[in-house]
Amino acid sequence: MTETEQRAARDQRARFEALAQVVTEPLHRYLLRRADADQVDDVLSETLLVLWRRIEDVPGLEPGAVPHERLDPDAVLPWCYGVARGCLANARRADRRRRSLLERLTWTAAGPARDSEDPDHTALHAALAQLRALDREVVLLWAYEELPPSRIAEVTGLSANAVSIRLHRAKKKLASQLERKTAPHPGHETDEGQETGNGNGPGNGRSSR
């Protein structure tokens, strides 16, 4: 790195540090009022990263204007709020796509009722983990990125036919995994009269399975 590049890097760092000192707390409060609690820190980090990358676009922080005194928040915060707003919108879109992925996989693999039975989708995550890496990638590209087999083939280097076969088999395996994980355990239907010889009287007429 040349001396000129080193000076430019130091200048960028100084401008960012001065900016971060002024805007971090207000941005944190801004996000607390608008984002879910578990999103705030991630979105704030992403916002600060964007500010670092776009430091030359921040009003009053052009190259060479290294601030030696505290910045005026009113001069920089509106622009920074706009960056935070964009980062929050991106995070919400990503969250919606993740939920869509889970809902789509759950519906396809085991039917719509699984969502209420397993609200954290623990069984689905475990079933996905059982797939081979390439099969899992094919499923995620189909469900999360909403790509058809022909496009998945471009990403993975497989043929479109191979993708279709892998996707079909992977979805069947997911359905089987989820069915086993959510099936009733033996003996859970005792109070329904499904088991006999327990001294609790006659059954209700249902046949044992």
Image: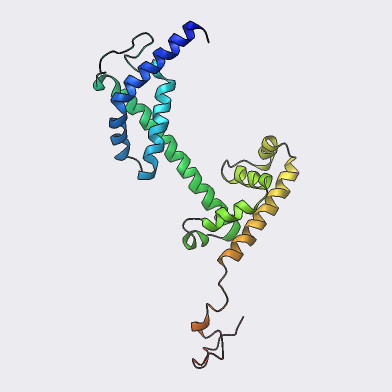
Q: Position of residue 33 (x, y in %)?
A: 29, 40
Residue 153, located in which quarter of the rendered image?
top right
- Applied colour scheme: rainbow
Q: Residue at x 73, y 41 (%)?
A: 160
Task: Relative to 23, say whether 29 is above or below.
Answer: below
In-front residue for pair 158/52: 52
In-front residue for pair 148/99: 99
Q: In the figure, is residue 132 to the left or right of 82?
A: right
Residue 88, located in which quarter of the rendered image?
top left
Task: Relative to 179, say whether 164 is above or below.
Answer: above
Q: Residue at x 52, y 52 (%)?
A: 103
Quarter occupied by the C terminus = bottom right
Q: Position of residue 164 (x, y in %)?
A: 71, 47
In-front residue for pair 84/51: 51
Q: How many marks?
A: 0
Q: Position of residue 208 (x, y in %)?
A: 60, 83
Task: Relative to 154, say whether 19 is above or below.
Answer: above
Task: Relative to 182, say whether 187 is above or below.
Answer: below
Q: Residue at x 58, y 64 (%)?
A: 181
Q: Residue at x 47, y 61 (%)?
A: 116
Q: In the figure, is residue 39 to the left or right of 178?
A: left
In-front residue for pair 24/97: 24
Q: Position of residue 109 (x, y in %)?
A: 60, 57
Q: In the figure, is residue 128 to the left or right of 168?
A: left
